[in-house]
Image (tube, rainbow, N blue to C red):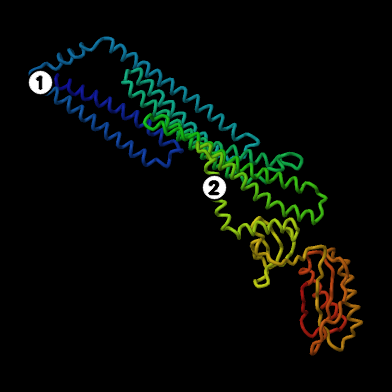
């Protein structure tokens, strides 16, 4: 009889161990199903094995203690049955009543939790189907399924953890256990939902992006959206950082030991907001400047060039202004008074300014270039100092310090405004396309002149970039076997290089058709 009693006590301990191990296993399975923490799957499995080993160790220790204690009582000649009954009778009857009520309440709560989960899963399935059937939806079905599966796992784990917490209260478990379970529940929900929100935000932003493109038209404000669309990745990153900072702040607040660090969370969120608003403000203002400058469709070519010249300057000025304001706002957010820093920066700036003469020279020359209208964006120029190599090409941008010039061969040349030197502008009012033609000494110059002038008339009629027909300027030089004739064709600014090639080809074909042999290749000189 004593042996059966000992086996019953050991069996009770084992049953309790198996029940606790089953509950712990269920909790960890819920964690492993949640895809938002799949990156920590190995760590969770390791923790599960460690907890299981600890439970086995505790179970074996209790079984050994039960066997040793009962052996000691038998050694003393005690009746184990009577001794056990005596111990049970010493327990107040209210304890058994409370334990029975607690077990009944726990079973009822677990049943209610299971029923609630059935309803939750049903309505999540309905929501999933409706989300897929929305006409304007642009997200793929797989992303929607992933989102609702993650949401289902989060709700399931949260409900079961909440049920375990209330069961511990019903069973009169020490209060510290319930408190730690509450902390665990809050931390889990904060992290799980915090990792789920970016996916939902991304899906919403992508859907709104597609809708904005679909409904944009020249008549509404959405016509500006395409110019601001490149900010979407930046918006996603900022929102992601904000969510992560909020999650970290809320988790830190749950741990009393480090709760004071949480005060930095709102400041970091404000800094991210300032950076994002600054970037958006800069792009919007720049877009409005372009809209105002180029709103008039009847601008002349010169007016268009002047306004295109102003745009990079305004952009640079706005960029520095917005970034300066953002820096001051960030300093105020960090509770740092920027006034002493700005005063110190001013003193340092003055000291540096005396040594930065080249920088000042570039800026001053840049202003003179703009105000005296030496050249504009789109002009074809040649610039440089006599003792240095000249640069030439189309002006792409005029900034405070530098001018960007695109060479006809394609390379981008950047020259400091202070090093511009003398400027030859080929884009003012008109320019001559100069083409030199070689003809034999025995040629009839009257016939040659007539052919060239007739070809010039045809070129003017067929090409709108030619202002006046080609005129023969005369004999440029006398060679050993040929005469060199110089021709002038008045063309629009910046078109001379392209038209010189066209004119050479047309002249060569026309002269060959008239039986006039060209002894050497066509030569050219540019003014």
Q: What residue is shown with label 1?
A: 74
Task: Tell me if 447 is positioned left or right of 47 in this view.
Answer: right
Depicted 104 relative to depicted 437: above or below: above
Q: Where in the figure is residue 166, as x and y percent of width and height? A: 38, 20
Contact between labelled residues 1 and 2, with CB atoms less than 8 Å apart:
no
Figure label count: 2
Q: Secondary structure at mark 1?
A: helix
Kindly tell me whether residue 226 is visible in this rendering: no
Name the front one of labels 2 and 1: 2
Picture residue at 14% right of the left edge, 19% below the top:
1
Depicted 246 relative to depicted 493: above or below: above
Task: Tell me if 278 is positioned left or right of 68 in this view.
Answer: right
| Circle 1 Cα neighbour tier, 10 Å, few/some/many (<14 / 14–19 / ≥20) | few
Q: Where in the figure is residue 22, as x and y percent of width and height? A: 33, 29
Picture residue at 40% right of the left edge, 21% below the top:
110
**Mark 2 to mark 1: distance in Å?**
89 Å
Disc ID at residue 96:
none
Q: Where in the figure is residue 435, as x and y percent of width and height? A: 80, 75
Q: Secondary structure at mark 2?
A: helix
Q: What residue is shown with label 2?
A: 345
Image quadrant occupied by the C terminus: bottom right
* Badge 2 or badge 1: first in the primary sequence: 1
Question: On the image, which quarter does residue 259 sit in?
Answer: top left
């Amino acid at each position: 009889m004593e042996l059966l009693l000992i086996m019953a006590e050991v069996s009770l301990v084992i049953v309790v161990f198996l029940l606790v191990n089953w509950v712990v296993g269920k909790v960890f399975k819920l964690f492993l199903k949640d895809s938002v923490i799949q990156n920590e799957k190995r760590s969770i499995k390791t923790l599960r094995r460690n907890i299981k080993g600890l439970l086995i160790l505790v179970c074996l220790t209790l079984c050994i203690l039960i066997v040793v204690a009962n052996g000691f009582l038998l050694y003393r000649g005690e009746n184990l049955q009577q001794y056990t009954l005596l111990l049970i009778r010493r327990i107040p009857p209210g304890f058994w009543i409370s334990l029975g009520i607690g077990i009944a309440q726990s079973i009822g709560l677990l049943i209610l939790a299971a029923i609630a989960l059935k309803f939750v899963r049903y309505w999540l399935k309905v929501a999933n189907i409706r989300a897929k059937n929305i006409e304007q939806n642009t997200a793929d079905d797989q992303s929607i399924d992933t989102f609702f599966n993650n949401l289902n796992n989060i709700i399931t784990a949260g409900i079961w953890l909440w049920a375990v917490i209330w069961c511990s209260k019903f069973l009169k478990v020490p209060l510290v256990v319930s408190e730690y379970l509450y902390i665990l529940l809050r931390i889990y929900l904060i992290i799980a939902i915090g990792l789920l929100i970016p996916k939902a935000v991304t899906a919403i932003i992508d859907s709104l992006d597609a809708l904005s493109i679909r409904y944009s038209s020249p008549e509404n404000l959405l016509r500006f959206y395409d110019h601001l669309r490149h900010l979407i990745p930046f918006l996603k990153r900022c929102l992601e950082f904000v969510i992560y900072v909020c999650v970290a702040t809320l988790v830190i607040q749950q741990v009393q030991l480090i709760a004071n660090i949480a005060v930095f969370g709102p400041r970091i969120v404000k800094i991210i907001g300032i950076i994002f608003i600054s970037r958006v403000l800069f792009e919007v203002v720049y877009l409005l400047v372009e809209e105002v400058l180029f709103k008039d469709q009847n601008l002349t070519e010169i007016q268009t060039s002047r306004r295109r010249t102003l745009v990079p300057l305004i952009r640079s000025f706005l960029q520095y202004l917005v970034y300066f304001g953002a820096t001051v706002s960030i300093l105020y957010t960090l509770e740092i008074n920027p006034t002493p820093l700005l005063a110190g920066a001013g003193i340092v700036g003055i000291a540096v300014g005396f040594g930065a003469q080249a920088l000042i020279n570039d800026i001053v020359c840049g202003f003179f270039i703009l105000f005296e209208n030496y050249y504009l964006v789109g002009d074809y120029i040649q610039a440089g100092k006599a003792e240095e190599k000249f640069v030439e090409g189309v002006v792409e941008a005029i900034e405070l310090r530098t001018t960007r010039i695109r060479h006809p061969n394609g390379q981008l040349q950047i020259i400091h405004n202070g090093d511009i030197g003398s400027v030859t502008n080929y884009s003012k009012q008109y320019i001559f396309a100069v083409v030199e033609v070689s003809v034999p000494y025995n040629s009839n110059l009257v016939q040659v002149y007539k052919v060239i002038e007739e070809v010039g008339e045809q070129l003017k009629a067929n090409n709108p970039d030619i202002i006046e027909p080609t005129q023969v300027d005369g004999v440029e030089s006398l060679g050993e076997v040929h005469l060199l004739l110089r021709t002038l064709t008045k063309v629009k600014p910046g078109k001379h290089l392209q038209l010189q090639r066209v004119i050479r080809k047309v002249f060569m074909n026309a002269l060959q058709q008239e039986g006039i042999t060209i002894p050497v290749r066509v030569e050219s000189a540019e003014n």
